[in-house]
Image (spheres, helix red, strand yellow):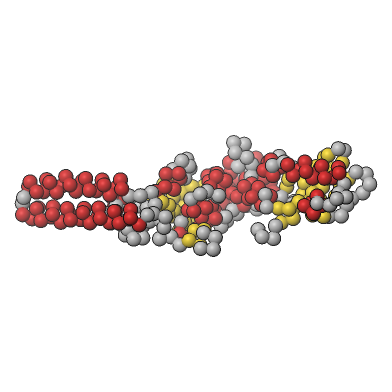
Amino acid sequence: MWEINKKNEEMDWHDVVSNVKVAFLDDAITGSKYPMAVDLSKPDSEVTKTVLGLAQSGTGEGHDQFLSGPQVCFDLTLTNKAWVEGERYRFLYFISSQSTMHRISKFDLDKSYIEYVDPRVIEIMKEKRSSYERVLEAKKRATEAGDKERIKEAEELEKRLYLEMLYTNPAGFKITAKMVTNYRQLKTIYAQRRDHRLPEWRAFCRWIETLPNSELITGAAKKKEIANRQKWLLVSHNDGTGGADAFDVEKYLSKEDANTAMVQAIETIAQQSVDTLVDDGALDIEEGCATLEYMGVTYGFVVKPDKNI
């Protein structure tokens, strides 16, 4: 069984991903600088703000093409349920994998299932394997005795029982495959799966965060996640009369003497989707600030990280 962290019910990513190798990362980062280069001796593998901007561009814009360069090879262990979902990713390539078609009768069934599989189903699988093994023994005896009729009967029953094992095997059966993909594909997977219901997908995304320069993959998605867990602080308002001291917006809104225009401005920005603010460039989490024009007044905001993050 896979180990689950009982404190937060999260699966250890080491149980999902192993034997990781990354190649061509520096080459890809260097190549991302070619479009603006005349002298090709100058581009290097430093991750600059421009490189991050390209990596964090939106789906379909094409600016993150260089992320197709870094190749990642690894062993991936998922349940049948998760494998079906993983196969939709066009650039998540199988090199080779374990095979239930060839070896379903040989796996250690006590170690092959995720903890959510009903134990009764596992017992059914064990019973079917025992029946299959008995037929193999009967076939062996019939072969030694030269009994062709019994051999034929055993072979027919052998085929049926093997198919019963294949089709009865539950969705929680774990299979390991040798995979290869690239950073761009991992960017898509991370954006779609980091909060997935299946624990193995969440574990897979936590592994992605450990890769070299993982911010190239997780950047845009991580920005939104962080932004949604911030507290707004109004640090200035430029209405021609000077600035204002920093204060907590939530506390300010509860004050009876709060400035009406300022409250309206705060409520306006609070009603906007943080995702939209990030995508539109109105909110730059790295710089930690945003501005809002409201009724001729410019309001400056910064974000205060939640200490619980």
Residue, x 8% and y 55% (percent of image)? 144
The answer to whether residue 281 is seen in the rendering is no
**Residue most extreme to the left:** 146
Where residue 192 sits in the image (x, y, percent)?
Answer: 55, 45
Q: How many labels does the image show?
A: 0
Q: Which quarter of the image is occupied by the N terminus?
A: bottom left
In which quarter of the view is residue 117 placed? bottom left
Q: Which quarter of the image is occupied by the C terminus?
A: bottom right
Q: Classify residue 228 as left or right of residue 175.
A: right
Q: Classify residue 263 as left or right of residue 109.
A: right
In which quarter of the view is residue 93 placed? top left
Residue, x 51% and y 62% (percent of image)? 5
Q: Is residue 34 above or below residue 120?
A: above
Where residue 180 sits in the image (x, y, percent)?
Answer: 46, 49
Residue, x 42% and y 55% (percent of image)? 116
Q: Classify residue 56 as left or right of residue 103.
A: right
Where residue 287 sits in the image (x, y, percent)?
Answer: 75, 51
Viewer-side residue, 128 vs 301: 128
